[in-house]
Image: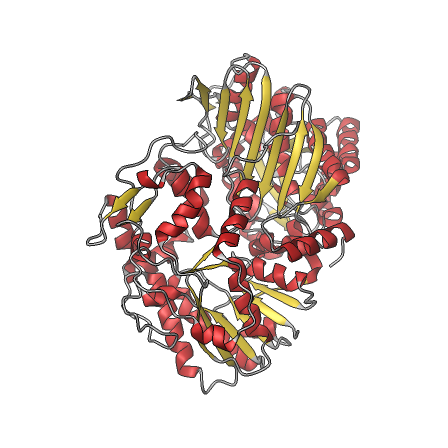
Amino acid sequence: MTLDTMIIGCGAVAHKLYGRPLQKLERAGDIRVVAVVDPYLQQARSLQSSFPRARIYEHANDAIQAALPKVTFVLSPAHMHAEHAVMALQSGSQVLCEKPMATSVRDCATMIDSAAQSDRVLSIGMVRRFFPSFRRLKQLIEDDVLGQIRTFEYREGKRFDWDVATPAGFQKRQERGGGVLFDIGPHAIDLLLWLFGTLCVVSAEDDALAGVEANVRLQLKTSECTGLLQLSWDVPLANYLRVQGDKAEAVLPLDRFDRLAVKKRNCYEELDCGYAFPADTLKVARRHCSPSLYTDAIHCQLIQFIRSIRWGERPSVEGPAGQDCISIIEDAGCIRQPMDMDWLDPRRRERYRELQRSGTL
Amino acid sequence: MNEIAIIGAGGFVGPALVESLLLDGADRVRAIVRAYRSLASLARFGSAVAVRLADAENPDSLTDAIVGCSLVVNLTTGAPHGIIRSTAAIHEACVRARVKRLVHLSSAVVFGEVSSPSTADDSAPLTKHWMPYARAKAASEIFLRNVLDSSPVEIALLRPGIVWGPRSPHTLGLVESLLQKRAFLVEDGDGIFNSIYIDNLISCIQACCNDRDDVRGFYNVADSEHLTWRDFYSALAPHLDCDMARIARVPSSHFPWSVRAAIDYLQALPLINLTYHRFKARIPIALKARLKSALGGNVSYERQALHYQATPYVDRELWHLQRTRYKLPTAKFTDRFPAQPPVSFDEGISRTIKWLSHIGLIAHEPCYAT
């Protein structure tokens, strides 16, 4: 059965990440995109050119009423996720909402309630769950190859080069869900939660003055180990996750998601990271894929979402897991301190700290 | 201070300038960027910075963006073929918007290896440099030189060498090469390190902006110390567990060609370079990712390499930079703007080390909570 589909939000995420995988699903007869929604009509038209049967709508409400979609992809700016997802769920649509799930735990709870009341799937777009190396790392931890985990170190950063269509991601969190912690933080936190089960924020520091942070560092604690999470929008960081256990260390390069190495006796050994994700929506999948590209991983994520609708399989990330990520981010916000930038001129460094504490500029 | 517009504010120098201006009490700073993505590095300043989107090659959109500002700082970079166009467009926009002063950031690269001791602030740039970026910067200088006296806008052109320090892409590149034991020195690193610490460059820009008198002219700007490449490497290497004696030495007499260097050479040819930059923007993201994945080579899992490369890849630009023979004179600037307290080399290194620790490249800090 082909599912009538609506895409809310026709910006960079829709164009660059979801466009081709959705076209692939449409060609396979799994979905039929019937509505694209965006107040910026130029963007909507551009996306529509890939889905000729889709009609353009300025507002999600109009699209829902006219197109009655069975499936909705919420790809709008983060601060609109909750509103759009709830609207779609209440109309009876199944929803995949791109990360971050919402901009507050309260909004996440509303979305989860909505999905439960309407008995619909609410899946959160955490595409990295479909990176083979991430699966392999989880397996290593579960199989006790690393032993008791002692520490982890997650650093991810580069100059921001995502061709965003709006400035929402750079605006105040309360209003727009901006900042690097809200941008790449959900990916990192979801991965760490998935690997270690629980996370607690010990300390948080960032460089936001009157705006949102471009750099953030969190000290985190799980039930058995401690670790560092550092993210940046303006500095190329090492871009890896290092997990140190008492038997071995694993190193996962974040920009090469089919690579993973384990260090034993002073020597790094690269592991085979192949993982067979279902690549079609048949009840017993005939085709499988081990993604080595972002768009392949998105395709696997979409397949999994359709499978959860069609065959009742669990989506890879459900509402509560998405909510846990936002909860960690909120916890960090509650205890955040000014980042001590000791490389600044002493006078400016002190001024920076004063301004950060006062929250004015 | 009057309202200042910074064109190309989202790069490396721009956020440092914005930060200094705001911390020094400026309340009217306007950042001009081409696309929203450039706002990421400015996002921490929030509403303290007014942001305008404009295409630096389009005088109409630029005029709208800078109108009302009496000072404009041009920090744009980008593809070489766009540099000359943006210089002309920015000047035209400044004239139309009745801007009083334009501070234009050029580069000491226009003098190549500084092969003559008499190279001065007003010397003509090399127009036949092998590097497209240097040719474009030289062409921009020539354009500004031609309008310098007749323009209603006061044009101050600053010509820094290598800008180093925290957040510098150049410094990061060198640090990476030292960590991975693939750094090289031309001969024994005796070439002149014509450079300026980022805070010192910001001080120079601010001095130009704040001066009450006419500042028009071309100025070399640099750190005060007379340094060689060996000095710079030696200051960083111990913090990166790198033994200076084991860094590869390459000859100065001839460039050590490799396949990669040959590709770089071809890419630098004017027509190919123009085509490359036009084509690059149109490559689909999936194809880019496939190419990156295929050409990415081996992943380094060590925090730093254990073995020194005897014959590392020699980047042609870096090889030429390391052959620099003379320190560029900066007396014109220091005479004209005498009150600039520079950050010393040692202090700059100390701050850079702190920043490298912060981003995890130097593992002397405790990474983990206790």
Q: Tell me if residue B337 can be seen.
A: yes
Q: Image check: A249 left or right of A327? A: left
Vertical placement of residue B108 versus A263, above or below? below
Horizontal and vertical percent position of residue B26: 68, 67
Residue drawn where x is 72% and y is 27% of the image = A320
Seen as rendered, the residue at the extreme top is: A143
Residue drawn where x is 58% and y is 27% of the image = A152
How many marks the image carries: the answer is 0
Horizontal and vertical percent position of residue A308: 63, 24
**Quarter of the image that includes the C terminus of chain B:** top right
Seen as rendered, the residue at the extreme left is: B253
Horizontal and vertical percent position of residue A23: 51, 39
Residue drawn where x is 26% and y is 54% of the image = B266
- Foreground residue among A262 and A169: A262
**Quarter of the image that includes the N terminus of chain B:** bottom right
- Where residue B33 sits, quadrant-wise, is bottom right
